[in-house]
Structure formats: C-alpha cells, structure tokens
Image (cartoon, rainbow, N blue to C red):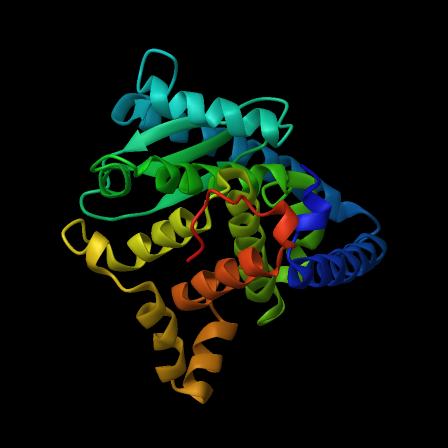
Amino acid sequence: MNISEIRHPKEALYRTICLIVGSLIWLALLLGTYFFILIFLIPIAISLWIAEKFFQVSVYGNAVNVNSKQYPAIDTIAKEFTASLDLKKQPEIFVVNSQGMTNALAIKFLSGKYVLLYSDLVDLLWQKDNKEDQLRFVIAHELAHHAAGHMNFWTNLIMKPAKLIPFLGAAYNRSCELTSDRIAAELVKNQKASIDALIALASGSASLFDLTDKVAFIEQENRVPSGFGFIQEVGSSHPRMTKRVMAVNEYGHSKPAAVRNPNVQAA
C-alpha cells in the first residue's frame, strides 16, 4: 500500500507547513540559546521512558494483551494489517475495560507502539454475525496512525513548536484522522462497514446500531450552525463524526469503478 497516494490532501499540506515552521523555530531556539536547549532533551527522554514503564504496568496489569492465545481472531486481523501496512513490528494491542466509553487509541513512546481497544467498542462492533469488518476498520484506523508516521517521535518533536500555534496543530491532527480513515477503508475494502463503524462510534448504542439511517446521519451536518460549527472545529483535534462519514463516503465514490470491489455494497 502506497500511503503517500492515500494520504488526505489537507494532511500533506499541514504536515509540510508544520515541518517547515517547526524546523525554523527549532533552528532559532538552537542558535538563540547556543544549543543549550538540547540539554532539556535529556530529561524529556527520561520522562518519556518512565512514563512508558508506568503505562506498561497499567496495561499489562489491568488490561488484556491481544496475542495468539488471547483473542486470536483480533490478533489475526492485526497481523494482516501490520503486513499490509509494512510495519516492521506489530504494535502491542490491548483490550481495556472502558466502563461504557466507546473508543480506540494509538499510542507511541520512544520505542514502544501500542493500540488500545475499549471493550465496549469491541462489544458494539462484534455483537453479532457479519460485524467483523466494522471492528477491522477500527483496528486498521489505529494501526494506520503508526504506519502513516503520525506517532513518529522525531517527526512530532520537529513539528512540536509549530503545533503550539493556535489552530495549526488542531488542523494537522484532524487531517491525520481523515488520512487514517482513508487507509482503514482501503484495507477493509467494505465502504458500508467502514461508515457503519464510524456511526457506531457516534451513537454508542448496540440496540440502535442496525436502525441508524446513514443518509439521515450525514444530513445532520447541514443543521450544524455554520459560524459556531467553524469555531468548534478549528480548535478540535478530531473532525465532527458527520464530516468523517462524509469524507469516507466521498472517498469511496471518488475511486475509479475499476478499483471498487463489485461485491461490496456502497453506503
């Protein structure tokens, strides 16, 4: 999979801006402090190492590690996508007791890569037959963050000063979400299941899952007050779910018919 061809255009733009601006700010800081600022990288690195150790204590002691012995079906999905994304090593995956929250996270420290799957989200997406592609979409989305370089320590370090600029960091983060949605949709090759997974994140209801009208959900975006919607969005790290569903829907329909899966029902 060529991620550069799938990457959302806005991410390519914001990524370039953040790298250039971040590099210039770092250069100014280095020259302005005669490189003394590099001394602060040592305690930062130590802090990250300590944070990862406490994180490992928490997840290994309180969550369930996915592997060939624990939840092998999920592990098989992760292995498949790890290979497709050309990740050198599969991130450690954990199912976490979420106490009602439906979410999933990609996390990276200095070296370790992790994916957390909230238990209620797994239950929601895998509650009955034919739901596997929806869970696959979520797993693929989180692995895509690692494969697309969104979690890369050095890249994020270079971009860090730029991401502190109001609205720029949030815009970059939103574009990363759209890129990961695209990559996940490409891996799952089931546009309807991809959209269903996103709407499930919005509703969080197992009872209403099959009753949700996808077109009506997308149309809700038209009822968002434009000015206030813009203000809310520019400071948010994630696009509104209506916009994410619209983006996946439009991306699927924008692909040439020859590369669409004829056996997949479009949303």
Residue 69 lies in what quarter of the image?
top left
Q: Is residue 111 visible?
A: no
Look at the picture and state if 81 lies above or below 89.
Answer: below
Task: State the quadrant of the N terminus.
Answer: top right
The percent coordinates of residue 86 (x first, y second) are 65, 28
- Give whichever of 210, 257 is nearer the camera: 257
The percent coordinates of residue 250 (x first, y second) are 54, 63
Task: State the quadrant of the C terminus.
Answer: bottom left
Residue at horizontal 46%, vertical 50%?
191
Q: Is residue 200 visible?
A: yes
Q: Tell me how many marks there are.
A: 0
The percent coordinates of residue 237 (x first, y second) are 48, 61
Residue at horizontal 51%, vertical 25%?
80
In the picture, measured across the screen, residue 35 lies left or right of residue 204, that is right
- Give whichever of 114, 50 is nearer the camera: 114
The percent coordinates of residue 77 (x first, y second) are 44, 27
- Give whichever of 91, 83 is nearer the camera: 83
In the picture, measured across the screen, residue 244 lies left or right of residue 199, that is right
Give the farthest residue toward the top.
Answer: 69
In the picture, measured across the screen, residue 111 lies left or right of residue 106, that is right
Residue at horizontal 34%, vertical 35%?
132
Look at the picture and state if 32 lies above or below 69.
Answer: below
In the picture, measured across the screen, residue 192 lies left or right of residue 251, that is left
Residue at horizontal 31%, vertical 71%?
216
Give the farthest residue toward the left.
Answer: 207
